[in-house]
Image (spheres, rainbow, N blue to C red):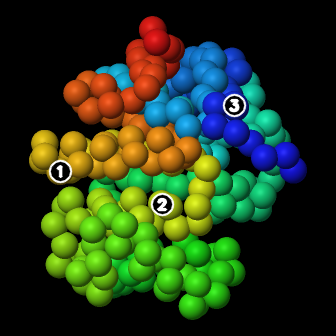
Amino acid sequence: MAERKKGSAVIELKDVHKYYRLGDSVVKAVDGIDVKINRGDFVAIVGPSGSGKSTAMNMVGALDIATKGDIFLDGVNIEHLPESVLAQIRGRKIGFIFQTFNLVPTLTALENVMLPMMFQRISLKERQARATQLLEEIGMRPRLNHLPKELSGGERQRVAIARALANDPEVILADEPTGNLDSKRGEEVVEMLKKLSKQGKTIIMVTHDMEKAKYADKIYRLKDGKIVNR
């Protein structure tokens, strides 16, 4: 496969819709959006609660499928792939960062970062080495063997970022990554995401915080499932 350069298209949504039926009503969570995201872009998706921003991110992350439309990842239409293939794509190409961290409470910081690599059949020695390196790079070396309950909110989100990077994914999806952090720790997190973008990672961040969204290169505003401006 030819090497893909920073700036080439990595994600494209074409006339994407997502509808849910509630009784006799149809909820149009995403109602016909077209988005093209290039490699290395730092994109923020903003909008009020219920605007469709998290639904759109879940479809990009192959966690959900569209009711109508096409979603391309590296030129491959993921809307027509079986779940077994989608699971492999999620494991190799996409890293997830959540507002609530979603760390395994019984595992140490090091073990949490090692976990995604286990599903890619990476050797224990390599998992330990890579996880240690990732945590060291984000200033967590003294906390490798601490459980999540022994870490601050900012430290837990740093571990979550390291875990998202474990399999060296092309795309990082961050759903309200600063929502449970104070202003200072939140700025540290978005600065880390900005740095990853400069290193060539594609970052898609869902947020309701316009101050944090300003760190992004592009901002998509959603309202009632539609992009209202860019």
Farthest residue toward the right? 1
* Residue 98 position within the rendered picture, expressed as x and y whole percent measured from the top left: 38, 53
**Callout 3 environment at 10 Å: few (<14), some (14 to 19), or many (20+)?**
some
- Which sits in the foreground, 220 or 82? 220
**The quarter of the displayed image where residue 6 is located:** top right
User: Label 3, on which residue?
Assistant: 9
- Cα distance, mark 1 to mark 2? 18 Å
* Mark 1 or mark 2, earlier in chain: 2
User: Label 2, on which residue?
Assistant: 164
**The quarter of the displayed image where residue 84 is located:** bottom right
Instruction: Give left or right: position of 221 versus 79.
Output: left
Above or below for 223 versus 113: above
Q: Secondary structure at mark 2?
A: helix
Q: Secondary structure at mark 3?
A: strand
* Mark 2 or mark 3, earlier in chain: 3
**Callout 2 environment at 10 Å: few (<14), some (14 to 19), or many (20+)?**
many
Above or below for 7 versus 81: above
User: Label 1, on which residue?
Assistant: 185
Residues at marks 1 and 2 touching, judged by CB atoms closer than 8 Å = no
- Which sits in the foreground, 214 or 118? 214
Q: Residue 23: in sight, yes or no?
A: no
| Type of amino acid at the residue the image marks with label 3 | Ala
- Cα distance, mark 1 to mark 3? 31 Å
Farthest residue toward the top? 229
* Mark 1 or mark 3, earlier in chain: 3
Residue drawn 63% across and 76% down? 119
| Type of amino acid at the residue the image marks with label 1 | Arg
